[in-house]
Image (spheres, grey):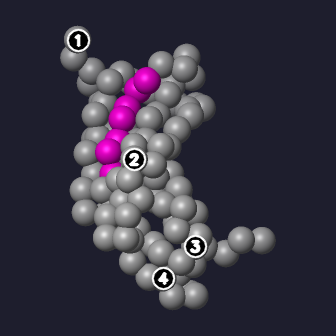
Amino acid sequence: MLIDFTEAELETIAAAMDDATAMVIISAYEFKKGPLSTDLHVLFHRPVAVGEAVIEVRIIKLGQKLATVEGKLFNADNKLAATLLHTIQPSDMSDEEKPKIE
């Protein structure tokens, strides 16, 4: 079956999954390291309608030089719609770069 996504839809889904996996990495390194992406690989499985979706993130490897995380996006029917494999080089963050938690 051919799924016809627009380019903007693909970019939005990939960006949301990139943000979700990056925040998990920042948290895993206790807000001391930020993510420099070395590879993002996205597989699109089915369309996602405008509305709610859920992204689940799993850390595969958390090392000193590289980290790998997997993101899965589920549509409103809880069906897998996209998978992201994100490889990251953890790098030190300055105080200005660290997320503000209130």
Q: Which of the pair 74/65 is nearer the observer? A: 65
Q: Residue 65, percent across and down? A: 31, 70
Residue type of the residue flagged with mark 1: Met
CA separation, marks 3 and 1? 42 Å
If you read the primary sequence from the N terminus, does the residue marked by circle 2 or circle 4 appear first?
A: 2
Instruction: Name the mark on residue 59.
Output: none
SS class, disc 4? loop
The residue sitting at 36% across, 59% down in the picture is 67
Q: Which residue is mark 1?
A: 1
If you read the primary sequence from the N terminus, does the residue marked by circle 3 or circle 1 appear first?
A: 1
Cβ–Cβ under 8 Å for marks 4 and 1: no
Cβ–Cβ under 8 Å for marks 3 and 1: no
Q: Main secondary structure of the magenta part?
A: strand
- Stretch in magenta: 80-86
Judged left or right of residue 58, residue 30 is right
Categorize mark 2 by other alpha carbons within 10 Å: few (<14), some (14-19), many (20+): few
The residue sitting at 55% across, 32% down in the picture is 53
Q: Residue 19, percent across and down? A: 47, 56
Inspect this view and state whether residue 8 appears.
Answer: no
Q: Which residue is mark 4?
A: 93
Inspect this view and state whether residue 98 appears.
Answer: yes
Q: Which residue is mark 2?
A: 60
Judged left or right of residue 3, residue 14 is right
Q: Of tags 2 and 4, which is closer to the observer?
A: 2
Q: Which residue is mark 3?
A: 31
The residue sitting at 43% across, 24% down in the picture is 80
Q: Residue 51, percent across and down? A: 58, 31
The residue sitting at 71% across, 71% down in the picture is 101
Cβ–Cβ under 8 Å for marks 1 and 2: no
Q: Residue 43, percent across and down? A: 28, 34
